Image (spheres, helix red, strand yellow):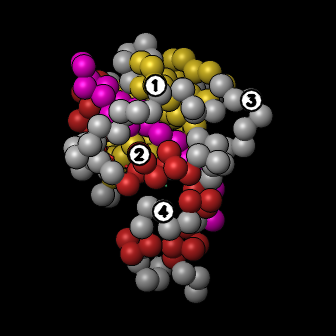
Amino acid sequence: MADVADLFRRLTAGVHVVGVADGGRRNAFTAAWIMQVSFDPLLLALSVNPGHASHPLLVRGGGFTVNVLSRDQLRLARHFGLESGRDTDKLAGVPWRPARHGAPILMEAIAWIECRLTVQPIRAGDHEIVIASPIAGEILSPEAVPLTYADTGELDGSRELYPPSL
Ligand SMILES: Cc1cc2nc3c(=O)[nH]c(=O)nc-3n(C[C@H](O)[C@H](O)[C@H](O)COP(=O)(O)O)c2cc1C
């Protein structure tokens, strides 16, 4: 039987920085668990840990931005994914601008999508799934190749969270 962490890392996923805002408060975190889940209407799903500093801003703000990273932006994945906005202002020193509803758009992202939540978050084990409608977006670097979760290796330190076998 395959190692479960190795097995699950073969499920391809991109790497993104999710921006959130509630009133004047903003934050952002790295997220691989984002996918399109419907064509009509067009919908995205994001799985978010309810313990993250970003979680209350996302739910109260009613939406988020998805900032797509390129293959050479591992440093941004690390910056937004290994520290919490509870301890530091992760957006300080990173060029960004607010989307229509205030969530940050990273100027260095290769593309961004602004989304609004459509239903209440759904509990999924130790995470919550939020489903959202895209309302705006832009490709900023048409030639750039998106970063994949497999490219990040053990960056998120998640190996120990997988069961030893299925
Ligand atoms: C490569 C990578 C992928 C991640 N994917 C997710 C994800 O899909 N969902 C999630 O809730 N956290 C994910 N994380 C963890 C958060 O980015 C991390 O815990 C972050 O520090 C939370 O920030 P916050 O407390 O400022 O909201 C990921 C981290 C990394 C490094």
Q: Are marks 2 and 1 in contact (CB under 8 Å)?
A: no
Q: Are marks 3 and 1 in contact (CB under 8 Å)?
A: no
Between 121 and 10, the residue placed more toward the observer is 10
Residue at the image point whose x is 24% and y is 50% from the top: 51
Q: Amino acid at mark 4?
A: Leu
Which residue matches tag 4? Answer: 155
- Residue 160, image x and y in percent? 39, 75
Q: Earlier in the sequence, mark 2 or mark 4?
A: 2
Q: Earlier in the sequence, mark 3 or mark 2?
A: 2
Which residue matches tag 3? Answer: 142
Q: Are marks 3 and 2 in contact (CB under 8 Å)?
A: no
Q: Earlier in the sequence, mark 1 or mark 4?
A: 1
Residue at mark 2: C-beta within 8 A of ligand 1? yes
Per the model, the C-alpha gap separating discs 2 and 4 is: 12 Å
Tell me, yes or no, whether the highlighted magenta stretch contains residue 15: yes
Report whether residue 131 is seen: no
Which residue matches tag 2? Answer: 80
Which residue matches tag 1? Answer: 96
- Residue 33, image x and y in percent? 49, 49
What's the magenta region? 10-28
Mark 2: give few (<14), some (14-19) or many (20+) Cα within 10 Å. Answer: many
Which residue occupies the extreme front position in the image? 93
Residue at the image point whose x is 57% and y is 56% from the top: 149
Q: Which label was assigned to residue 154?
A: none
Q: Amino acid at mark 1?
A: Trp
Per the model, the C-alpha gap separating discs 2 and 1 is: 13 Å
91 to the left or right of 166: left
Q: Amino acid at mark 2?
A: Phe
Per the model, the C-alpha gap separating discs 1 and 4 is: 24 Å
SS class of the residue under badge 4?
loop
SS class of the residue under badge 2?
helix
Per the model, the C-alpha gap separating discs 3 and 4 is: 26 Å
